[in-house]
């Protein structure tokens, strides 16, 4: 069986982020043949073309390398004001400005966790549109919207909600199949 190294990207920088906790849960629930490492890109600066013209910042180059070296990317992001978090959008903007944008043809799966009841559904459709601009290959279903996240993780950040654990497991199985289907040989 092929093995896939998946890069996790969290759209929240908060230490106790529910989305980061969801990524950690995904790392545990992944089927055999998949492994997860989570990107640390908190030091990526705000995009500024003047900065880009001075040379791609080292923090951005590190993220470019991490995405390029991965077989697939799993994005977990909160919804901010009905859309994608600025943290995540900023990172994608930088990744789109390098000579070989690394999201091109990259299998991607997305999920979102919010304290509101809709679980970030509105933001996911914006994220799909943004990733489309990068020619990323985004898994369609199952969709995962973790609403009222404060009731689904314990104080240590463990995902305790059984329904969500099952859904996440199903998404990861579908993602593994998706990567196998779309990965460039
Ligand atoms: C700037 C900002 C905007 C937010 N907008 C939304 C929103 O549109 N919908 C929603 O469900 N929650 C919204 N929230 C609440 C987030 O769901 C909540 O803070 C969540 O815990 C963030 O994810 P995290 O735990 O991964 O940091 C917002 C929070 C912030 C800080």
Image (spheres, grey):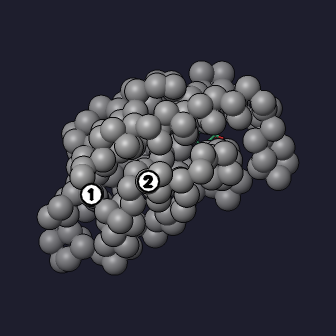
Q: Please tell me whether mark 2 sits on a helix, a strand or a loop.
A: loop
Mark 1 lies on residue: 102
Residue at horizontal 35%, vertical 65%? 69
Residue at horizontal 37%, vertical 43%? 180
Give whichever of 109, 115 is nearer the camera: 109
Number of labels in the image equals 2
- Whether residue 22 sits left or right of residue 159 in the image: it is left
Q: Please tell me whether mark 1 sits on a helix, a strand or a loop.
A: loop
Asked if one can make out residue 45 in the rendered structure from this viewpoint, the answer is no
Q: Where is residue 33 in the image (x, y as percent from the top left)?
A: 53, 53
Residue at horizontal 44%, vertical 37%? 177
- Whether residue 107 sits left or right of residue 163 in the image: it is left
Mark positioned earlier in the residue sequence (2 or 1):
2
Query: Seen from this angle, which residue lies furthest front?
Result: 1
Q: Where is residue 23 in the image (x, y as percent from the top left)?
A: 61, 49
Q: Mark 2: few, some, or many residues within 10 Å (few <14, many ≥20)?
A: few
Select label 2 or label 1 by which is in front: 2
Q: Position of residue 181 (x, y in %)?
A: 33, 38
| Distance CA(mark 2)–CA(mark 1) | 21 Å
Residue 2: mark in rendering: 2
The answer to whether marks 2 and 1 mark residues whose Cβ atoms lie closer than 8 Å is no
Q: In the rendered image of this protein, does residue 171 appear above or below residue 97?
A: above
Query: Seen from this angle, which residue lies furthest right?
Result: 155
Q: Residue 53: which quarter of the image?
A: bottom left
């Amino acid at each position: 069986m092929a093995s896939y190294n998946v890069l996790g990207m969290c759209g929240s920088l908060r230490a106790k982020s529910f989305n980061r906790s969801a990524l950690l849960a995904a790392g545990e629930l992944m089927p055999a043949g998949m492994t997860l490492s989570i990107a640390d890109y908190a030091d990526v600066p705000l995009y500024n073309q003047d900065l880009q013209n001075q040379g791609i910042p080292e923090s951005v180059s590190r993220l470019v390398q991490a995405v390029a070296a991965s077989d697939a990317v799993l994005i977990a992001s909160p919804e901010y004001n009905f859309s994608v978090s600025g943290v995540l959008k900023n990172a994608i903007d930088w990744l789109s400005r390098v000579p070989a944008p690394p999201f091109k043809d990259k299998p991607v799966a997305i999920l979102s966790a919010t304290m509101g009841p809709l679980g970030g559904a509105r933001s996911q459709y914006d994220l799909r549109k943004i990733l489309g601009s990068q020619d990323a290959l985004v898994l369609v279903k199952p969709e995962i919207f973790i609403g009222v996240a404060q009731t689904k993780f314990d104080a240590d950040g463990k995902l305790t909600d059984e329904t969500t654990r099952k859904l996440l497991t199903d998404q990861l199985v579908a993602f593994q199949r998706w990567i196998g289907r779309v990965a460039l040989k």
